[in-house]
Image (tube, rainbow, N blue to C red):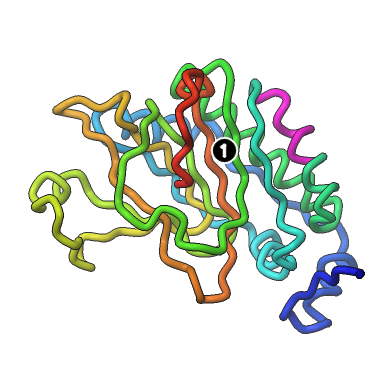
Amino acid sequence: MTSLCLSSAPLGRQRFLCDEPVPDISPFCEKTAHRIMAAALENGAAGFFPRQLDKVVAHALEYTPDCNLPEMRVIGPSSGMAAAVEEVCRDAAFGPAWLRVWLAQDILALGRLFQAITGAKELLVRLEAIRTDACRRFHADHVHHRLTCTYRGPGTQWIHPDMATEWEQGKAWPASAIRQVQTGTVTIMRGRRAETVQKPALLHRSPPVAGSGITRLFLAIDDATDHDNGDGIIPE
């Protein structure tokens, strides 16, 4: 039986992915991102680098059929990530060539950024298509630090540390306490292994999407040594 990969996008929208010429897309400034995020992490629970994905990229990602979204779990230095991403993208029949190259180069740059800020030598890189609520409860990761970026769909939800220390355990978080990272924004959050009394870990969760028809494309980068002892990986 032949499996069909369908998209709800109009035919004209689907043709956009293959008919348009290669767009000129500028990469984000790694030096600026490093300066902003490293300073925030020095004394805080997370560093954020706000950015909006190029409209052409965001459009192409939005209209990619769910079954063609690439997924991977790779361990290695950042230098090898671009080739790994491009291979996974080709295997998934993801996007036109320019979109595969863009995603590979962006993940390569984010891997370099994570290594420069945290000192990690080897990375564990996960790229996931998420259709469920994944981690529904607010939690902190059992790592030193984790970089995250949502390429498609709603971004990670989080709780400001000041609010986290004041709220009683076991109670549901009020909507006013929940903040949300914008799609495309890069976050490096402090985990349990790097927290102190003065520098708490960041409580966060996956945004609820189950039953909505939304499929997120989510990236997470850890220091691979945080998983040397066989620790399980919390999805987000």
In the foreground, 162 or 50: 162
Name the image quarter holding residue 109: top right
Instruction: Note whether 27 is above or below 69 in the view shown.
Output: above
Quadrant of the rendering where the N terminus is positioned: bottom right
Q: Is residue 126 left or right of residue 40?
A: right
Furthest residue in direction front, as rendered:
1
Label 1 neighbourhood size at 10 Å, few (<14), some (14-19), many (20+)? few
Name which residue lies at 21% across and 30% down: 199
Compare residues 88 and 177 and report the one nearer the observer. 88
Question: Is 164 left, or right, of 29 in this rendering?
Answer: left
Q: Is residue 162 left or right of residue 115?
A: left
Q: Position of residue 67 (x, y in %)?
A: 74, 62
Q: Is residue 61 magenta?
A: no
* Element on which disc 1 rests: loop
Magenta range is 78-86
Residue in the foreground of this view, choosing between 15 and 134 = 134
Taken as a whole, is the magenta stretch helix, strand or loop?
helix
**Which residue is at 18% across, 66% downward?**
174
Residue 152 percent location from the top left of the image: 58, 60
Left or right, 128 with respect to 10, comes to: left
* Residue nearest the viewer, comparing 62 with 42: 62
Quadrant in the rendering for residue 215: bottom right
Question: Dot 1 corresponds to which residue?
Answer: 29
What amino acid is at disc 1? Cys
| Residue 107 location (% of width, % of height) | 64, 38
Residue at x-position 20% and y-position 25%: 196
How many labels, in total? 1
Queried whether the magenta region covers residue 82, the answer comes back as yes
- Indicate the position of residue 169 as horizontal and vertical percent values: 13, 50
Residue for point 29% across, 41% down = 202
* 4 in relation to 70, above or below: below
